[in-house]
Structure formats: structure tokens, C-alpha cells
Image (tube, coloured by chain):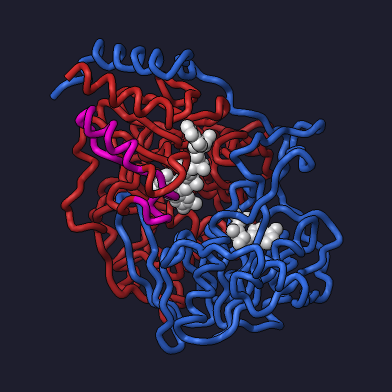
Chain colours: A red, B blue
Amino acid sequence: MAGVLVYIETDKDRVAPISFELLGLARQLTEQLGGSVEALVAAADPEPLVAELAGADVVVSVQSPALAAYTPEAHQAVLVEAIRSREPQAVLVGYTSAGLDLAAGSATATDRPVVGYCVGLAVDQGELVADSQLYGGKLVATTRTRPPAVFSVVSGSFPEAAGRSGGRGERVVMDPPDALNHLRTRLVGTSSGGDGAIDITKAERIVSVGRGIGGPDNIEVAEEFAAALGAELGASRPVVDSGWLPKERQVGKSGMTVKPKLYVAVGISGAPEHLEGMQGAGLIIAINTDPNAPIFQVAGYGTTCDLFDLLPALSEQLKAAG
Amino acid sequence: MHIAVILKQVPDLVEEVEVDASGAGIDRDSVKWKLNEFDDHALEQAVLIKESTGGEVTALALDGDGVDQLLYAALARGADRALKVPTSDERTDAPRIAAALAPVLREMAPDLVLTGVQAADDLHGQLGPILATSLDWPHVSVVSGVEVSGAAVQVQQEYSGGRMATLEVQLPAVLGVQAATRPPRYVPISRLRQIMASAQIGEAAAAGEAAALGSTVTRLAPPAQGAGAQMWEGKPEEIAQQLLDVLRERGLLGA
Ligand SMILES: Cc1cc2nc3c(=O)[nH]c(=O)nc-3n(C[C@H](O)[C@H](O)[C@H](O)COP(=O)(O)OP(=O)(O)OC[C@H]3O[C@@H](n4cnc5c(N)ncnc54)[C@H](O)[C@@H]3O)c2cc1C
Ligand SMILES: Nc1ncnc2c1ncn2[C@@H]1O[C@H](COP(=O)(O)O)[C@@H](O)[C@H]1O
């Protein structure tokens, strides 16, 4: 029995941090499930990635020009093939864009159950017990699943260090599946987004606005506070999707990951996809009228004061202090 | 170009979501339901494609409370047809919903299926990839922006750190929409009234048995409170002062 298989993701041609988290988690799980920690690398040139995977007992690699860039179709074909041949008790995929593509599809193709949004995963009496964040982080669901199964795991849930070493480092080279010869999905191009004029990842202080700001005309209130504080303006996804602020200012899963000394979240609920991008900030202050908003779980300080009352008061006092 | 867009109602998270007496589900009567935000974008994207390249849009939803209202709203927004899919059981999770929808879509044979990228109340995977895998069509999730080019679509897929890829996908295909090319449009209530008075909602053939999920929810609860935030209370001026005092103490004020 093969133990636990981790789908390895890359970020700028290096193994992505989430993959080390998953390898560390896989190590914990195999202690009870038995078997090996296996890592699946799908790439045009797997070798540099394989070299980073000292945390795996077995590195399964698939090499093909069709894997030069990530596409959901090619990577699903490889993952499905690997699950069929390695028969892992658990498959771990990050809850990333790739994870959103691959976890459920490969589970369906291999007739396994899938559990998403996991922030905790352990073995109990031969079953896999997962904690998943639902309803924008307002509730946590505990599930029991009989292996074999597939799990997608929220990044930031497990330590990376545990996945960086301690593996046996065996190699298995897998043939590219035939499906790679009939792909219907093709990469046309990539972009890193924005023209570099705004880079919030370098800011020491960020005032970030969420949907609670209500509309484009109200952005000004936050802008004024940010200016008085000497902070950059950040935003949650809905604010960007509504066109109130540019994409370069988006913080979170599909935006920027920021680690400022100070992060003031204004009218942001604190959905897991937002927290992913800012929970490493030095000091988090949350302004949100809903006392149950998940943002208060990661904030050091908070208030349920209405942002439209508080921000002007803040700007005024800052200006008065000069 | 025939586009099917699949719509779901989810609890409005601005209101409280309460756990029911079983401790493993939500109290469905106490929540306020609304169209899943990402489905709103999927619907908008479908209508935008129709407006730019022609074609027709069919809105689909599982039958249930409030579904007529949901589908009328989709018609008012520009869908050409609305179809509800009856199920005998309460299906809330993607694998079981896919089992109901896959046969309907196979028969309907649209060129493109759009879903929302995710629904925050469903932990058993994503409907789009499950449907696509069952139908053996390609799929892409986390899509923002779709353009038709011949027998294919070009889509933007988003990754972390602001990275993006343009992918070309042959049709038929399934896309999980994160954001439409433009924000969803507003429809005046008069238009909705007019649609409700004139339009018809169709009904698909009943779905087969739902597959078992293979995974059981044993508990649903608010997250364990960690240290939590220290909360400031009082008048706005007082809170502002406390906030700035903390920043001053920590050396976070000034250049
Ligand atoms: C694949 C994927 C990727 C995603 N990527 C991102 C991402 O990169 N970044 C991101 O942010 N989201 C992302 N999301 C979306 C995420 O799930 C949430 O929908 C989003 O973060 C919610 O934004 P919000 O907190 O601004 O809005 P809401 O959740 O609507 O919260 C608004 C908050 O404002 C408060 N409020 C309202 N009025 C006031 C007032 N007057 N004063 C004070 N408070 C007030 C409310 O109590 C509420 O808590 C992603 C989702 C998916 C599926
Ligand atoms: N019960 C349902 N009825 C209709 N559409 C659904 C249902 N469940 C999921 N969907 C669609 O699938 C998308 C992704 O949801 P999910 O995969 O459940 O996270 C939603 O945004 C909807 O477009």
C-alpha cells in the first residue's frame, strides 16, 4: 500500500510552499496509515523539482513537453494515472487554483470521495477526520472519510518545515499517460498581472477595504485614512471585481500575499481566501460591524464600530497630531 | 453557441448561519438565501458572450425552495431559457448534484457549461470538474474572463500572487467562473415583474438515484476561539484614540 500521495505544485519553477506543507502532513498521516510519503511531479523537466523533494520517500515523476506549463487537463490526466498506479490511501492537493481544478476531478475519475477546504486532517480508527472551513470561515465542518480519498488543503494550515526533509528519496519514473497526446486545452500565454506601478507587497502599512465600504464613492474615506497613516491601500476581491480598485491592490488567494507590519482590515469579513494573503502581518486591526466576522480570529485588535464613523475620526486625529 | 449556466442559492453570509439541532447541518429556515456570488458572475459572463457572439443561454438549477424566483431573475438578466431539474432527495453536495445534472447536460449538449468557481457551503468538491470529468469534457476553474474563438474559448485562469494564464479550451467545455469580464448588471424590478408575468420555467426529466458521498459530516460548529482580538468599545473618537495609542506604542505611526 502506497500511503499518501502529494500532488506537487510549482511557483516560478520551484516547489510551491503549499507542497511542503502537504509533505509534512503526509508524514504525519503515514505514521498511522502506513506506507510511504509519495510526491508526484509532472513537468517538462522534473529534475530540479525532484531535487527539492527531500521530504518524500518516493518521488514519482512524469516527464513530457505537454507538461511544460500547467493546464488542468494535462495535470489531471497525470494525477489520475498516478492514483491508479500508486493506489494511495490519501491524496493531498493544495486548495489553490490547481487544487480547485484537480481534487474533485481526479477523485471522480478514480471513484474516491473528496473533501475540500481542509485546515486539519488526522487519522482516527482507520478513518480520515478532516476539519474544513465552510461559510466563509464562519463554521468548521468535521468529516469522517474511509480511505482511499482525496483532500484539498488550505495553505497556511500546516508547517512547511516538516515537509522539507526526512524522506527516503526513492525514484519512480512514470510514463506519460496517453491522454497527453489528445489534449483539448492549450496554454496561450501567461502574465504576472499589473505594470509594476503599484506593489503592495513592499508596503509596511496597509489599509485594506472590503465590501463593507459599500461603493466606489466611499473609497475616498479609506484613502484619506491611509494617506494620513502613510499606508498603501489594499482591497478584498469583491472590491476589485466590482471595479472600485485595481487588481494590483487585491490581497488574498488570487491576489497578493502581504506581510506588512500593520494591516488594517476595513469592512472585510475574513474569508479563508482573504486570510491566506495577510495572516502573516505583524499587527492586524479589524474594523467590522459583525462581531462574529472571522477576521476577528486573526486580528490582534478589533472593533465593531461602523467604519463610516471610525475612519473620519481616525483621519481627523492623525491630522491633528500632525 | 449554446451556453448552460448552473445556479445555486447559498446562505447570505452577512447574516448569521446557525447550526441545527443535529449539530451537523445548518438551520436552513433561519438563513437568508441568495444567488451564489460566483454564479452571479457566471450568469453575467454567459450573457456577455451571447451579446458579443450570439447564441443562447439556458439557466439551470435544482428544484427546491425559491428556485422559481432564482430562475426568473436569470431570465430577467438575459438568459433565454430556464430549466429546473427535479430531485427526489435533498442534494447539497457537488458529487450528488453532478449525478443529477450530468444526464440533463448530456442530452442538452450545450457548447459551454458555466458554473460558479465554488459555493462556500459545499465541502465535497467542485461541481464543475466533477461534471466535466463525468462528461469527459475539459474544464478550467478560477476563470476570470472568457472569449469565444471559433470552436474554442480563450479563458483567463488566475493563480496566487497576481499571476494569470490564458488557456485555449476546445468546446464543449466546463468553466468555473470566479469573475465575469464585467461586474454583474443590475436589473430593474419592473423588468423582473414583466418576466414573471410572461416567461415559462421548464422542467427537466427527473434525475436518477444519487450516489453515496463516502464521507460523513459529524459536526458543524463555529471555529474554536483562539486568543481572538482585543475589542475596543466606545464612541468613534474614543476608539480612534485607543487605536492610535496602540500604533504609537508599537512605533507604527510616523514616517
Ligand atoms: C478561488 C477563490 C479565490 C479567491 N481569492 C480571493 C482573494 O484573493 N482575495 C479576497 O479578498 N477574496 C478572495 N476570494 C473571495 C472570498 O471567498 C470572499 O468572498 C471575499 O474575501 C469577501 O470579501 P469581503 O470580506 O470584502 O466581503 P464580505 O464577505 O461581503 O464582507 C464584508 C464585511 O463588511 C462588514 N461591514 C459592512 N458594512 C460595514 C460598515 N459600515 N462598517 C464596518 N464593517 C462593515 C460586514 O460585516 C462584512 O463582514 C476568493 C474566492 C475564491 C473562490
Ligand atoms: N445544488 C446546486 N444547484 C445548482 N448549482 C450548483 C449546486 N451546487 C453547486 N452548483 C454550481 O456549482 C458551482 C460550484 O459549487 P460547488 O462545486 O458546490 O462549490 C456553484 O457556484 C454553482 O454554479
Q: Quadrant of the N terminus of chain B?
A: bottom right
Query: What's drawn in magenta, residue-wise?
Result: A219-244
Asked where in the image residue B128 lies, by quadrant, the reply is bottom right
- Residue depicted at 27% across the width and 51% down the height: A248
User: Is residue B153 magenta-colored?
Assistant: no
Rendering coords of residue A10 (x, y %): 32, 53
The picture quadrant for ligand 2 comes to bottom right
Rendering coords of residue B61 (x, y %): 71, 65
- Residue depicted at 44% across the width and 21% down the height: A302
User: Is residue A231 magenta-colored?
Assistant: yes
Rendering coords of residue B147 (x, y %): 41, 77
Q: Is residue A58 above or below residue A32?
A: below
Q: Nearer the viewer, residue A67 or B48?
A: B48
Compared across the picture, whether A222 is left or right of B120 comes to left
Q: Is residue B160 above or below residue A154?
A: below
Compared across the picture, whether B252 is left or right of A263 comes to left
What predominant SS class does the magenta segment belong to? Answer: helix
Compared across the picture, whether B96 is left or right of B234 comes to right
- Residue depicted at 47% across the width and 39% down the height: A212
